Image: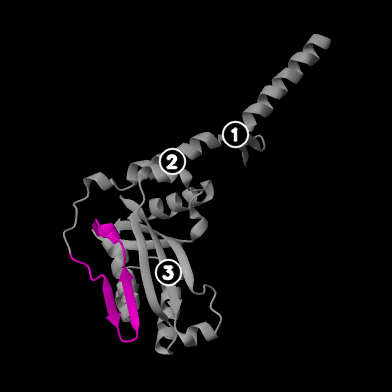
Amino acid sequence: MKRTITLMLAACCLLLTACDNSSIGIIGGSDGPTQVYINKSNENKDYEQYLTEHYVDESKLPILDINLEKRFISDDRVLITDDSVENEWELMIYEFYHNMTSGSFGKMKAVIEDESLLAAVENEEKNFKDGIYYSKICIDDLELLEKDDLKDISEKNKREIYERLNHLGISEFGIAKVETELKHNEKSLSLAPQVGDGEVTRYYLIGKKADTYKIFEVYWEEFLND
């Protein structure tokens, strides 16, 4: 009897250990509910594999041979670029900031593929018309993250990226990191903006959709677990 109880306890321990990396679901059956164990490690492999396989291979991208305006002036606003642009993915983000400086919000909205981001740009457009904007944007660093950098993204963000892009059938994506120095004009500063003057880092999730580059999300400083 003792031997039987011992074996049963050992079996339970093994089952609980197996459940550490699993979740339990319930499905209905003709003879009542049935517990189903779903292995989370396999689920993790799905989105890890997707991100790795669909991330753009920077080594295969053609190098751009263009002369950027290092100092672009539009009325009382200026965009200063201290870094080079090496491929089309980085060029898209540079043009995004260029359009922000010139007030070309139609072009900005044309590359947005997310409703919340679109609403944010539309609000920025409204502020611009009211005289509220950045008087100076300096791009200190603009680079496309390497595939190896994906390991530094939180599991939550990895899963979110996977679900968003996989649902839309995006075949290729990349993440551009932009380090900037921002300066508001006086009217903007008087309204105590959420992000004041100073250094700001953003990560742009870019996907290629119908041979067109689109921005699907923008992440803030703590996107990578440096």
Instruction: Look at the numbered disc 2 and give the secondary structure of its residue.
Output: helix
Is disc 3 in contact with disc 2, using a CB cutoff of under 8 Å? no
Residue at left 34%, top 59%?
A: 142
Tell me if label 2 and label 1 are in contact, CB under 8 Å: no
Outermost residue toward the left? 65
Q: Is residue 17 left or right of residue 115?
A: right
Q: Depth check: 183 or 128 in front? A: 183
Residue 148 in percent (x, y) is at: 39, 42
Residue 181 numbered tag: 3
Q: Which residues are magenta?
A: 67-90
- Circle 3 — which element? strand
Residue at the farthest right position: 2
Q: Position of residue 91 (x, y in %)?
A: 26, 62
Q: Residues within 10 Å of mark 2 (few under 14, many from 20)?
A: some
Q: Residue at x 39, y 53 (%)?
A: 165
Residue 158 visible within the image: yes
Instruction: Determine whether the residue tagged by mark 1 lies in a helix, strand or loop.
Output: loop
Of the residues tagged 1 and 3, which is closer to the observer? 3
Q: Which residue is mark 1?
A: 21
* Structural distance between the alpha carbons of marks 2 and 1: 16 Å
Which amino acid lies under the numbered mark 1 shown in the image of this protein? Asn
Judge left or right: residue 68 versus residue 197: left
In the image, residue 90 sits, relative to residue 132, either above or below, namely above
Q: For residue 102, what is the image quadrant?
A: bottom left
Q: Residue at x 79, y 9 (%)?
A: 3
Q: Looking at the picture, which amino acid does disc 2 mark?
A: Glu
| Quadrant containing the N terminus in the rendered view | top right
Tell me the distance, in whole angstroms, between the alpha carbons under discs 1 and 3: 43 Å
Of residues 204 and 5, which is closer to you in this image? 204
What residue sits right under mark 2 in the picture?
Answer: 48
| Residue that sits furthest to the bottom in the current view | 130
x and y percentages locating residue 64 in the rendered image: 19, 57
